[in-house]
Amino acid sequence: MVDKKIIRKVATISRIHLSEEEIDSLKNDFAEVMDIFSEIDKAEVDGCQAISEAKTLSLKETSQSTGDEHDYDVDEIIRLSPHRKGRFIKGPKV
Amino acid sequence: MKDDEIASLDEEYKFLSKRCDVNDPRKKGILSPYTFSLKDAIWLKGVETTASSDILEGFCPVENSTVAQKILENGGRIIGKTTQDAFGFGTFCTNVGSRYRVPLNPSDKERCVGGSSGGAACAAKLIDKHIAIGESTGGSITTPASFSGVVGVCPTYGRVSRHGLITYSSSFDKIGVMSRNVADSAVALGIISGMDEKDETSSDIPVSDYVAATDDFSAKTKGMKVGILDFEGVDEAISQRVGLISERLEEKGVEIEKIDLPFTKKYSLSAYYIIAMAEASTHLACLSGLRYGKGDDVSKEYNEYFTDVRTGGFTKEAKRRIMIGTYVRMAGYRGKYYEKALKVRQKIIDEYKDLFSRFDAILCPAAPCVAPKFDEIDHMSLSQVYSMDSITAGPNMAGLPNISVPVSKSDELPFGAMLIADYFQEAKLMSLGSLLEVLR
């Protein structure tokens, strides 16, 4: 059972503010979704490998280097930032 | 079709998140007869690309995605970005950011177009000689194709480069095509497929000639063996129609046999949502309003700044998926959910591999129902919404290619039949899909 304390902890880790109303709503959502997820408790997977590498799915024998093909204009990339100072990206104080 | 006609259709059905007109006038090629649209998660240089979210407001990529580049190099003209569920989180294309309009089904404006590539399906249906580039994580091409009455092709994982795709779930995401017929999809898929040095998950396996696969398809499909897969909870009319189509395939010399995938049918939906949400929660961690997208008051304290940007920028569904995805990766829960789901995934792949050692393809409904009405969607529980992916979760878990072809009668709301093939066997799907088109 996922309680409100866990919901608050997950929200903090996820960097999301929640109102009390949203916490109540998410508590119900978690219960419903965990019910779906608990289905896999019954799955027999002895001897199965945990597939976490996307490469395994694409059936490739070797990985390839992504190299240095990007030819970005640094100024263009900096211009994408909402806060800038000269050629620097400005962020909140640590 | 003229620009003002497209604008008028967009005004009525609301499928474009951004209009544009991008082509390379020096390039003429096989794609010159077509107009294209890109799902809003796919980069187009200088054109706002947000995956229909609020948090990426103002983000204009500094280069083209590989798919967009290939379209332009082969003479294609890109006329817009299509609306989607924000970041692909949805089944009906209703979870869009606050600046976006919900697309309306071309057959009935009170119904959804399906998601998450909903705007793409709508564009493919409404615009003449148009190819919409979509993306599927767990069924986001097949479902809207079925609901909107168009062909949707989701290729093998790694067949099409994802360089320049805003990620939902990297071990699932696949870029594919949607169009009014199989032949047009074959043309486009042939161009956008292939290895790309900018995407290390793209495959170097040679690309087959998909256009040739649509020629003389009767001869090519004669003797093929197709397994028929039933699902519980599918509308009776859809099950009956797919059954009828299988009988017609048999009359054309295709060998038909009923099959089952018991493990996949039982566990693919839960395992899919666990892995997809876990991956999504990590991929979206980079969205913080610092390097790009929507910012906030930079004088705020460090954590407050990021938290405020994310709280204001994500839809309700995005927050839900990030939260659940974070939870299933946390110490104490990781083994029970995430790691177990990864093992389930391996067993699902093994079940398909065993089947494809004996069959050329699988035939089943593409979706359990026709496009629901918006007021029906409002009253669905979360588990009812997520279970809409119960048919498509399997092939997407395994990274297998699949195609949805409309098979409904002309006086019915549209629905599709889905064909699934073994890895990199898209040509077989093109041949069988072409045959389905003439049998419906």
Image (cartoon, coloured by chain):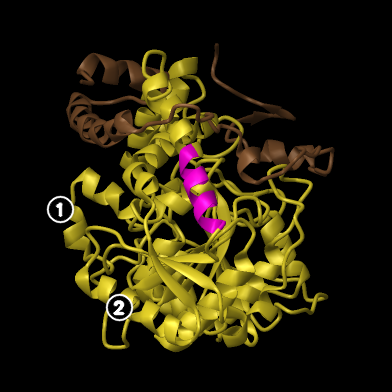
Bounds of the magenta segment: B347-357
The chain ID associated with circle 1 is B
Name the residue: 42% across, 32% down.
B341
Q: Colour of chain A?
A: brown
Name the residue: 34% across, 22% down.
A11
Q: Which sits in the foreground, A79 or B53?
A: B53
Residue B26 at x, y = what percent?
A: 83, 75
Query: How many labels were placed on the picture?
Result: 2
Residue A38 at x, y = what percent?
A: 28, 30
Name the residue: 61% across, 56% down.
B423
Q: Which residue is mark 1?
A: B379
Quadrant where the N terminus of chain A is found in the figure: top left
Which quadrant would residue B278 be assigned to in this image?
A: top left
Q: CA distance from mark 2 to mark 1?
A: 28 Å
Q: Is residue B300 visible?
A: yes
How packed is label 2: few (under 14 Cα within 10 Å), some, or many (20 or more)? Answer: some
> Three-letter amino acid code at disc 1?
His
Q: Which sits in the foreground, B363 or B39?
A: B363
Q: Main secondary structure of the magenta part?
A: helix
